[in-house]
Image (cartoon, rainbow, N blue to C red):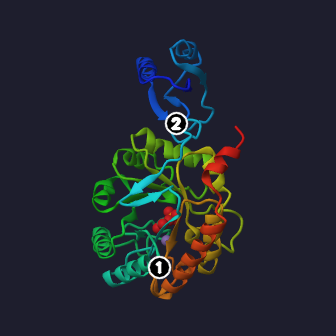
Amino acid sequence: MIVIMRAGATDQQVDAVREHVTRLELGTIINRGVERTVVAVVGATHPDQRDGLLRLDGVLDVVPISRPYKRASREAKHENTVVTVGDVEIGGPEPVVMAGPCVIESEEQLVSTAKAVKEAGAHILRGGAFKPRSSPYSFRGMGEDGLKLLQVASRETGMPIVTEVMGTQDVDLVARYADVLQVGTRNAQNFLLLDEMGKVGKPVLLKRGFAGTYEDWLLAAEYVMAGGNENVILCERGIRTFETYTRNTLDIAAIPVIHNLSHLPVIADPSHGTGRWELVVPMAMAAVVAGADGLMIEVHPDPDKALSDGAQSLTPENFRRLMDGVRAVAATGRMNRNSVARVAPK
Ligand code: PEP
Ligand code: MN
C-alpha cells in the first residue's frame, strides 16, 4: 500500500503514519517528494488496514501497490534512484560506461586495457576474476589474484571496480576489493546470493537472467532491497531467443519498460547481448538513445587471443569509436528517464 500524505503534511503526521505501520508489523519506505510525501507500506498488507491509515491526520489517500515487487517499483518511489560509486553517479544526467576485459588474464593485459578505456572516457573498470563458464574446461578466472590486479589497475587509473561474485562463499572476499558487486545472468535467481547482496553494504549490479521476465528481474532486485540494500543497478544483457546468429537478443525495449516500472537505474551490456563485436557499437548507441543509464562493454588489447569472449570484445581503438558514438547520441537524442515514467500508463 502507499499512503499519500496531503501537501504540507507535517513531520509529526508522517511519523505517526510510520508508527502506526510499525505497530502492524510492516515496513515503511518514506519518500519526501517536492510536492508531497508518500509512505510506501511493505510486507504482507491486508485491505482491512486501509481504513485505520485513512483516519490518521495528514493522510490524503491510501492506494494498493499493484506490483509484486514493492521496493523496486515506481509506485512506491517516484523519484529516480541514483547509485553513487566514488564520484560516479549511475542514473544521473550522463550515461556511465563500465569497460574492461571479460576475464583478467595478467597485469599487463588488465592495466593496459584499463588505461586505454580510461583515456577514451570510461568511468568504471570491469574484469572477471571468478568466471561462470559454460564448460568446466574453459578458463575460469584468476580468483583472488585477479582481484588484486583489479586493485592495481584501479589505483593506476583512479577508476572504481565492478566484478562478479559467483557464490555466497565468495561475497566477503569480493566485497573487500570491488566497489560494485556484479550478479551474473546465471545467478539472477540465486536467492541465497541475492539475500547476501542485501547485506553487503556496496552497490550491486544485477544482470537480467537470460530467460528472465521483467518481473523475475525486478523481484530479484526486490530480494536485494528487502535485505537492506537500495543501491541496485539493473543490467540488460540479452535474453535467449530462437535467433542463433547473435549469442543473445539484446532487449532494448527493456530500458524504457524498466524505467517505467521502476525507479532503479538500468544499463545495457551489448557485448553479451550480441556476442559479436561488430554489433556492439550500434547496439550501445541504440541503448543510450533508449535512455540507458550506462553501458557495460568488453574490451581486450588483442581480442583474437582473449581467454574468454574474444568474439564480442572491442579493441581499444573500437572502444574509442564507441565512446565517440555514445557521446554524440547522448548529446542530441537520449530518451529522458523521467519522461518515460511520466508518459507511462498506470
Ligand atoms: C560478465 O559480465 O562477465 C558476464 C559473465 O556476464 P553475464 O552474466 O551477463 O553472462
Ligand atoms: Mn564475457
Of the 4 image quadrants, the one containing the C terminus is top right
Tally of marks: 2
233 up-or-down from 283: above or below? above
Three-letter code, disc 2: Gly
Q: Secondary structure at mark 1?
A: helix
236 up-or-down from 150: above or below? above
Q: Is residue 191 left or right of residue 243?
A: left
Of the 4 image quadrants, the one containing the N terminus is top right
* Residue drawn at (44%, 76%) of the image: 101
Q: Is residue 172 left or right of residue 196?
A: left
Three-letter code, disc 1: Ala
Q: Which mark is residue 22?
A: none
Res 19 visible: yes
Q: Secondary structure at mark 2?
A: loop
Circle 2 or circle 1, nearest the eye:
2
* Residue drawn at (60%, 31%) of the image: 65
Q: Residue 270 lies in what quarter of the image? A: bottom right
Task: Name the N-terminal-most of marks 2 and 1.
Answer: 2
Q: Residue 61 lies in what quarter of the image? A: top right
Q: Nearer the viewer, residue 233 or 159?
A: 159
Q: Position of residue 174 (x, y in %)?
A: 32, 60
Q: Which mark is residue 120?
A: 1
Q: Residue 110 lies in what quarter of the image? A: bottom left
Residue tagged 2: 33
Q: CA distance from mark 2 to mark 1?
A: 37 Å
Q: Position of residue 326 (x, y in %)?
A: 58, 72
Classify 10 Å Cα crowding around label 2: few (below 14), some (14-19), many (20 and above).
few
